[in-house]
Amino acid sequence: MIDAINTLFRDSFGASPTLITRAPGRVNLIGEHTDYNDGFVLPCAISKQTMVAVRPRDDGMVNIIAGDLNSASTSFDLGVPILTDAAAPWSNYVRGMASLLQAEGLEFPGVDMAIHGDMPQGAGLSSSAALENASGLAFAALAGQPDFDRTRLAQVGQRTEHEFAGCKCGIMDQLVSARAEAGSALLIDCRSLEVTPVAIPDDIAILIVHSGISRGLVDGEYNARRAQCEAAAAHYGVAALRDLATLPAQGSLNAVAWRRARHVVTENARTLGAAEALQANDLASLGQLMAASHSSMRDDFEITTPAIDWLVAILANAIGDAGGARMTGGGFGGAVVALVAKGRLDAAIDAVRQHYRTPDGHPAEIMVEQPKAGASLIL
Ligand code: GLA
């Protein structure tokens, strides 16, 4: 991939890059829609990643070429207020990082920039967080801060989503892509932003299956869920649903908001339980927690689809008590994650090949993943 981005850069700009960064995508093992409720999540960074290569310019322009989007290109000027670009929405993540890092006081020059990666689009594996962290780290390094605090980098990424992409997301995707450690998942307390690595035992495989149902255009549903959770927290007089150790009676709260709250309260407990089960290499308990998480996303949070439910059922059936499966990410499509004893991995993959087709009739994309480290400089 380094050769590919070097070639793309030289072919596009006629010189070599002076700096290359990378940031990984992520898969969330458990703890869904808990992050913006100040709760707990347990994601891990994966090998699929985005790379950004840059070379400084002296005219303040940022000229970008996106190798993964048929070499789409766009430009913007660091010297004037940076706006979103409806004609190149993929570039809004870079525009946001540049704009908000400038606002944080970082001074960096214009650049020629090439973007290249191997993240599947629409799989819900956080290609946007990877692009935010990789481009943001490049700007920070050019500002003389290659060690720019990774939590702050993630927070700037989250603000980019809010202010430049219209998604009121939590901190999970950006934080795990910025701070993950190789070999471990990251238990994140989304209130304190404290992270605790939880090693993934060698005999457990991380299996990701892309349903073939593309995420996207679902920010409205996402933001609506967030608003319902905030309404439920306000109703119960707490700062966030994280503050409810158990679910209060419904009282005068409407039934939908109450079910949303039930998902969040129970999911927080499951996430803490799963971190312990992972540490103890207790695959049977992990599997039960993942199954309960999926049911809760289906029935209480209402973010799964029938095809995703079917895919999870195929995996759960093939895995038995040697692990578990659930939808991962924001919902309404995207990928399913399974944690499975390596001895049962082939059976799980065979079951998916045999029984699942994407909506347009193709076999699903299957990835066997490794927990990787967060954003870094590679040149
Ligand atoms: C998306 C958001 C995250 C998180 C998940 C759901 O990935 O970007 O902040 O809320 O959905 O868990």
Image (cartoon, helix red, strand yellow):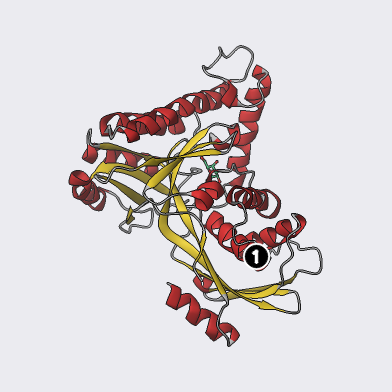
Tag 1 residue: 139
- Does mark 1's beta carbon lie closer than 8 Å to ligand 1? no
Q: Is residue 370 visible?
A: yes
Q: Residue drawn 80% across and 69% down? A: 79
Residue 165: percent from left, percent from top: 65, 54
Residue 32 located left or right of residue 87: left
Query: Which amino acid, by three-letter code, is at mark 1?
Result: Phe
Query: Image height check: is 85 above or below 334?
Result: below
Query: Image height check: is 200 above or below 83?
Result: above
Residue 46: percent from left, percent from top: 41, 54
Q: Is residue 89 visible?
A: no
Residue 324 located left or right of residue 179: left
Q: Residue furthest bottom?
A: 14
Residue 341 located left or right of residue 158: left
Query: Image height check: is 353 above or below 377?
Result: above
Q: Residue drawn 65% across and 65% down? A: 139
Ligand 1 is found in which quarter of the picture? top right
Q: Nearer the viewer, residue 5 or 221?
A: 5
Q: Nearer the viewer, residue 283 or 161?
A: 283
State the SS at label 1: helix
Picture quarter with the N terminus: bottom left
Query: Image height check: is 264 above or below 371?
Result: above
Residue 105: percent from left, percent from top: 76, 57
Crowd band around label 1 with a 10 angstrom C-alpha radius: few (<14), some (14–19), many (20+): many
Q: Residue drawn 49% across and 34% down? A: 302
